[in-house]
Amino acid sequence: MTDLSSRYGSQSSVKARLDALSNRQRERLRTLIGEDAWAMVERHWDVVSRREQRPPEGDWSIWLIMAGRGFGKTRAGAEWIDGLARAYPGCQIALVGATQQDVRDVMIEGPAGLLNIAERGERPLWQPGLKRLVWPGGSLARCFSAAEPEGLRGPQHHFGWADEVARWGTTVGDGGDRAVKAWSNLMLGLRMGERPRVVATTTPRMVPVLQTILNSAGLVTSGGATHDNAANLSADWLRAMDEAYGETALGRQELGGELIEAVAGALWDRRQIEEARGSAIRPGDAEALAAVDVVRIVIGVDPPAGSRGDACGIIVAGRCGDGRCVVFDDRSVENLPPDGWAGAVAEAARDWGADRVVAEANNGGEMVRSVLQAADAGLPVQLVHASRNKAARAEPVAVHYANGRVRHLGRFPKLEDEMCALGAGGDYAGPGRSPDRADALVWALWALMGSAEPRVRGV
């Protein structure tokens, strides 16, 4: 087979020539070829794609597109595979997703999938019963699931597309072993033709299979942020995502396309939290609460120092019948006076039917109780005094996470950023001046786990 870099590996001549035209020349060309033909030109991938969505030049075997959500990774992967299938009639292709359903729903039938990027008369034939696509020239793509790595052991291929590889490890729930095995079997099967190649498209996440890919020989990478594709995304959705995640580590990862590495010596590990994550539960959802067998709900509070209106950590957690704990909600507030953050605590207690509010009293003493009960006279407040530093208090709680005894039901990006930036030696490398949310989490889980620490100063 010949090298396709001239056709699929650099900015196309079509794109370059169109960009070189003046506005007047573009209008003349549009008039000359007609509206229908011009519309086809404007939709052509060589014209609409960005440089980061086109394969890099040079001699490579793995192209990793690691970018934020909505960047256009799927479209880039599908266009590359479709181009190869048509350029090399009769070639064999592997399509690998986290599950067979993902392959079908995203890679094949999705809006940017292989069936929808081609003009209607040129579409490949989709044979769902056989789990394969067949192009008019005889090229064939088989569908595989990363959850079943043995399925990739026998077949041979010229090319491959591995989609959302960072999800593979979390989907199968075995710490990533099967995901790594699926990738290895895919690479071992890429042995047909002179230049077998694979594209891997993913939102970054520090999981074993992605680490394996990043350490591979013959790797080239491209990528970018969600906002790079803003022209094709809802402005309201982009605004909502920015407001929700902003500069949090989750936002940098899921929107910015940045691979967030662990802080050296941190008490918590993002992969650990991710693998134990469950679906969010809304306050008052009795059926969902019963399903997790919650027997007690506690709210941990880390009041701001003084009355300057710093952040107040407010974390809702529960204990299940089997002794395990779950984190339900992060109600933390910032820049509010005492009556403001106390009101937020009272509202969280009412919403979740909390059995107890556990609040640190190092800064403020009995005033903390007074402020909280001024917001709600019936609030069941328990004051605790920190006799050890933050890291020492947090270490036993982190051990419970490591032993699989704590799950997060939902995503709490700001809380998780603080947790994963708190070092065992007491260093804090996270956002803000202090890990207020992480402190509140520790107080809540201490109370739920029945530890002898921290010292209680009254009920």
Image: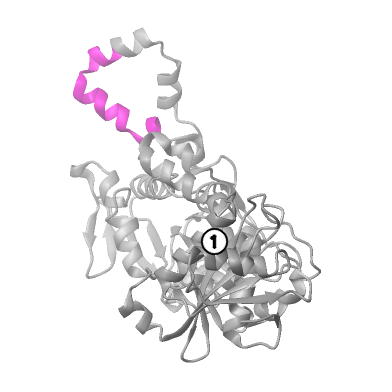
Observer-nearest residue: 60 or 68?
68
Label the magenta part by its dominant secondary structure: helix
Observer-nearest residue: 15 or 5?
15
Residue closest to the far bottom: 322
Compared across the picture, whether 23 is left or right of 276 comes to left
Q: What's the residue type where badge 1 is placed?
A: Ala
Compared across the picture, whether 366 is left or right of 344 comes to right
| The C terminus sits in image quarter | bottom right
Observer-nearest residue: 301 or 138?
301
Q: Position of residue 353 (x, y in %)?
A: 42, 75
Q: Label 1 belongs to which residue?
A: 342
Residue depicted at x 23% and y 24%: 37
Q: Pointer 1: residues within 10 angstroms few (<14), some, or many (20+)?
A: many
Q: Position of residue 196 (x, y in %)?
A: 50, 56
Residue depicted at x 19% and y 25%: 36
Residue range (magenta): 29-48
Residue depicted at x 45% and y 16%: 20
Q: Is residue 265 above or below residue 91?
A: below
In the rendered image, which quarter is residue 311 located in?
Answer: bottom right
Residue depicted at x 40% and y 20%: 18
Look at the image and tell me whether residue 96 can be seen.
yes
- Is 30 within the magenta? yes
Observer-nearest residue: 373 or 86?
373
